[in-house]
Amino acid sequence: MAFSGNGGQPFANGQFDVFEWYPFFQSCVVYFLDHAQYNGPVQALAAHVNIQLPFQRAHRPVLSSRSASSPSAAGSNSGANKPLTSPGAGGVYPNATLLPYIRRLVATGYDFPSVLHSFFGDDWEKGVGPLHETERRNYLFAAKSETWLGVKAAYDMGDDQMVPFLRPLQNVGEKEICAAEANWSEWLAMQDWMLGPRAPGGKGRRVKKEED
């Protein structure tokens, strides 16, 4: 099953096969849970940008992607703070999302390839690369839509995980800016209901009229 940007899918460029992508994403989740979150440099950077790693959470910490119980989990059979040690469907935790970490790295200017590799492993380009590209674009859109204070509020997280600082998007090329401009124009067209037969440049285009 492929999701194509040519079949009316907004903000999609080319072909994206979610089933081809998903195993690489799972690989990134497993690497992050089993290796990266226990790596000293990853822990240091997470502390610097003020985001908790899964095993550091006070509420239901995630210790690994493996189903075997960990020593810290063995002493408790219930309770809100019991670590999650059983994988969900597909072998990884359903609540082990990587997006908060990608967003925090983008907003603080640390989304370099070497850092993404340290966090998400060898498959990061195929596994989190599409998400990273989208989050960079979202950050550009946020900056265009909001004040600095509004953008910061959007990137703050609960449990005192406020973003300590914001940096302009790093390592931006002309191609990325042009793609973001095109997507932003699509969003503006959507705000004006310029969709389908009313899309800019399409046949039958007409401007929406507001009734008094």
Image (spheres, helix red, strand yellow):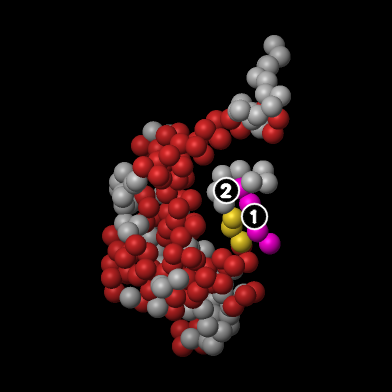
Q: Main secondary structure of the magenta part?
A: strand
Indicate the position of residue 180 as horizontal and vertical percent values: 45, 41
Where is the C terminus found, in terms of image quarters?
top right
Q: Is residue 9 above or below residue 80?
A: above
- Residue in the picture at 52% in, 64% down: 97
Q: Which mark is residue 12?
A: 2
Q: Which mark is residue 3?
A: 1
State the CA–CA distance, disc 1 to disc 2. 8 Å
Q: Is residue 198 left or right of residue 171?
A: right
Q: In the image, is residue 2 part of the stretch drawn in magenta? A: yes
Q: In the image, is residue 30 part of the stretch drawn in magenta? A: no
- Residue in the picture at 46% in, 88% down: 71
Label 1: how many Cα within 10 Å (few below 14, some 14–19, many 20+): some
Q: Is residue 56 above or below residue 48?
A: below
Note whether residue 26 is visible.
yes
From this viewpoint, which residue is outermost toward the top?
212
User: Magenta residues, as a range?
Assistant: 1-5
Q: Which mark is residue 191?
A: none
The mark that comes first in sequence, 1 or 2, is: 1
Which amino acid is tagged 1? Answer: Phe
